[in-house]
Image (spheres, rainbow, N blue to C red):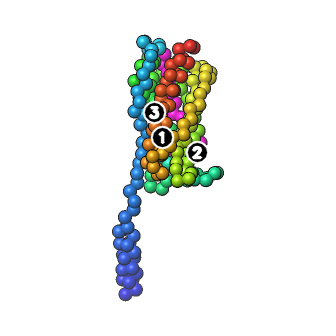
Amino acid sequence: MKQLAIIFLFGILFIGCSSKTLPAMNKYTLDITNQYNTQAKTKQPYTIKILEPTTSKLYNNTYIYYSYKPFTIYPYKINKWSDYPTKMIEQQLLQKLDSANIYKAVTTSAINGKYDFILQSELLQMVQIIKDKKSYSVFKIKFYILDKNNENIASKTFEYKIPNSTINAYGTVESYNKALNKMINELFYWLENTTKEV
């Protein structure tokens, strides 16, 4: 009889737990919609390899972060990136640089072969700042142009603080995409002019 009572009790607990509806997980992505309008009449006769950005352990995951007071940072619980931000940035750069018509060929670290330049980068900051019932997203990344001997030719940091339309994960993702769209033209203009002079 005791065994039946215990089984019945566990059955009720199991049904109670399984009937709770958990909030849906929102997954977000990065997408550069801008097209770079190159002034070059002909492609540069170079191959450039894009490497996935390096970053700290903090950003080496799918969390979307926010901060509302100094020295603190928190992840959104039910809002995440669909992939690591560094992987999404690498893929977006590959697609857009390939279609920008600046270089003879654009590859990634997954492809073996000869190259003339490497585009290496570090993701330094990617966080939503909430203050006085408003928020903005900070996106900071540093790029390096290396030659085929791994010598550093030039480096440049891009930093953007974009106001968010809403104080939530969607608002900050929207701002990151705006920052990436701003960055693409500045980055490609810098790349085109720097490698042209080498």
Residue under label 3, please give it.
181
Q: Are marks 2 and 1 in contact (CB under 8 Å)?
A: no
The residue indicated by pointer 1 is 176
Q: Residues within 10 Å of mark 3 (few under 14, many from 20)?
A: some
Residue bearing mark 2: 57
Q: State which region is magenta.
A: 46-61
In the depicted view, which residue is nearer to us: 76 or 146? 76
Q: CA distance from mark 2 to mark 1?
A: 20 Å
66 vs 16: above or below = above
Residue lying at the far right of the rendered structure? 71
> Which structural element holds mark 3?
helix
Q: Amino acid at mark 1?
A: Tyr
Real-space Cα separation, disc 3 to disc 2, in angstroms: 25 Å
Looking at marks 3 and 2 on the same chain, the residue that comes earlier in the sequence is marked by 2
* Mark 2 crowd level (few <14, some 14–19, many ≥20, 10 Å Cα): few
Quadrant of the image containing the N terminus = bottom left
The amino acid sitting under disc 3 is Asn
Name the N-terminal-most of marks 1 and 3. 1
Q: CA distance from mark 1 to mark 3?
A: 9 Å
Amino acid on which the number 2 mark rests in the picture: Lys
